[in-house]
């Protein structure tokens, strides 16, 4: 019988201790996702370089094996202020701290030390891939007239897949998103100036490093370099001057708020975004647009950005 690609589920659960199968279930840990790609045996092939008296391909040995799973999750809160969303485990496995203020909000900020890890089960029509010790990175994308998403990429330790009973996923923790429009995305400001936004992207920029040693294997987050881009309708330079800001290596506060329903709102704050050089112009419908780029800078450390769900 053929296996159907559409018949796939992703289950994710935090690990304790690291690299120990936390046994996620379809009922409690299923992720409602889109845009799935999977590399089941990332690694390298070491040639044996045998000396032989005849022509022919060299045999090789696979080394450094790991799994890489990518997917997108719609950016929408749990529906209840102060309750973490079903995708909170993904944020925490990407080096983010989660702080819950009961009945009010859930906040995520970057951390440097001791990020959590997760066990991921990727099941394709009964073929189960288990990714232990997984950590990752994400890109937050919000485009006009589109659905805002977090695009995650996770790397996990390799294990041979096996045939298992297909999980029965429960997706009740995931709510329908709102499209990014003027009404649904009420705030986008750069340095306190409201700009007309076409596309936005915040790239977390985690350096996810497979560390596969004798006596110890792990997937580590070894560095982070956030970048941010926003394509906006050009304004008079008296309103906002990206050229002067870039020349001065100035930082500005940036705010982006999406959602109009309490408990579902996603708010992003970047307190010190350094304006980068404007390297070109964009022509959209005969209208001049600026492709702005920024480098979110730490103020005191681990505060380059904050995501608030309320």
Image (cartoon, rainbow, N blue to C red):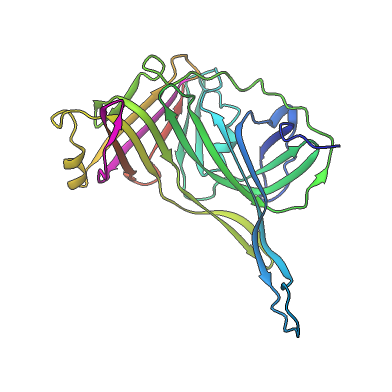
Q: Residue at x 72, y 69 (%)?
A: 60
In terms of depth relative to the viewer, which is nearer, 199 or 240?
Answer: 199
Locate residue 67 relative to residue 3 in the image: left or right: left
Q: Toward which corner of the image does residue 219 lie, by quadrant? A: bottom right
Q: Residue furthest left?
A: 238
Indicate whether 285 appears above or below 221. Answer: above
The secondary structure that most of the magenta stretch takes on is strand
Q: Toward which corner of the image does residue 167 lie, by quadrant? A: top right
In terms of depth relative to the viewer, which is nearer, 205 or 285?
Answer: 285
Locate residue 189 relative to residue 34 in the image: left or right: left
Q: Which quarter of the figure is the N terminus placed in?
A: top right
Q: Residue furthest front?
A: 55
Indicate whether 33 appears above or below 249. Answer: above
The question of residue 270 being in magenta is answered with yes
In terms of depth relative to the viewer, which is nearer, 13 or 245?
Answer: 245
Q: Residue at x 67, y 23 (%)?
A: 171
Query: Residue 184: percent from the left, percent from the top?
Result: 41, 16
Q: Residue at x 18, y 47 (%)?
A: 247
Q: Residue at x 56, y 54 (%)?
A: 220
Query: Residue 155: percent from the left, percent from the top?
Result: 61, 49
Span of residues in magenta = 265-288
Counting the numbered discs, the total is: 0
Query: Residue 271: percent from the left, percent from the top?
Result: 31, 36
The question of residue 79 being in magenta is answered with no
Locate residue 163 relative to residue 242 in the image: left or right: right
Query: Residue 50: percent from the left, percent from the top?
Result: 72, 80
In terms of depth relative to the viewer, which is nearer, 231 or 212?
Answer: 231
């Amino acid at each position: 019988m053929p296996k159907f690609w559409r018949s796939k589920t992703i289950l994710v659960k935090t690990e304790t201790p690291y690299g120990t199968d936390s046994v996620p279930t379809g009922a409690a840990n299923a992720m409602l996702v889109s845009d799935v790609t999977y590399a089941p045996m990332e690694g390298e092939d070491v040639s044996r370089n045998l000396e032989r008296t005849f022509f022919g391909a060299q045999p090789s040995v696979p080394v450094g094996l790991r799994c890489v799973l990518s997917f997108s999750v719609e950016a929408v809160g749990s529906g209840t202020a102060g309750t973490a969303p079903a995708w909170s485990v993904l944020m925490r496995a990407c080096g983010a701290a989660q702080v819950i203020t009961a009945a009010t909000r859930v906040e995520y900020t970057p951390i440097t030390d001791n990020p959590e890890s997760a066990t991921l089960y990727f099941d394709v029509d009964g073929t189960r891939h288990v990714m232990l010790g997984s950590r990752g990175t994400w890109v937050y994308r919000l485009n006009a007239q589109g659905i805002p998403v977090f695009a995650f990429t996770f790397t996990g330790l390799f294990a041979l897949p096996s045939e298992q009973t297909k999980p029965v996923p429960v997706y009740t923790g995931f709510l329908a998103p709102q499209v990014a429009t003027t009404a649904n995305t009420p705030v986008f400001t750069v340095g306190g100036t409201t700009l007309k936004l076409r596309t936005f992207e915040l790239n977390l920029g985690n350096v996810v490093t497979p560390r596969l040693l004798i006596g110890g294997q792990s997937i580590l987050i070894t560095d982070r370099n956030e970048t941010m881009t926003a394509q906006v309708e050009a304004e008079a330079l008296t309103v906002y001057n990206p050229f002067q800001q870039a020349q001065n290596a100035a930082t500005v506060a940036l705010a982006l708020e999406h959602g109009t329903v309490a408990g579902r709102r996603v708010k992003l704050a970047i307190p010190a975004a350094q304006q980068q050089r404007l390297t070109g112009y964009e022509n959209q419908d005969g209208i001049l647009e600026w492709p702005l780029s920024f480098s979110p800078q730490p103020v005191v450390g681990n505060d380059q950005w904050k995501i608030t769900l309320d």
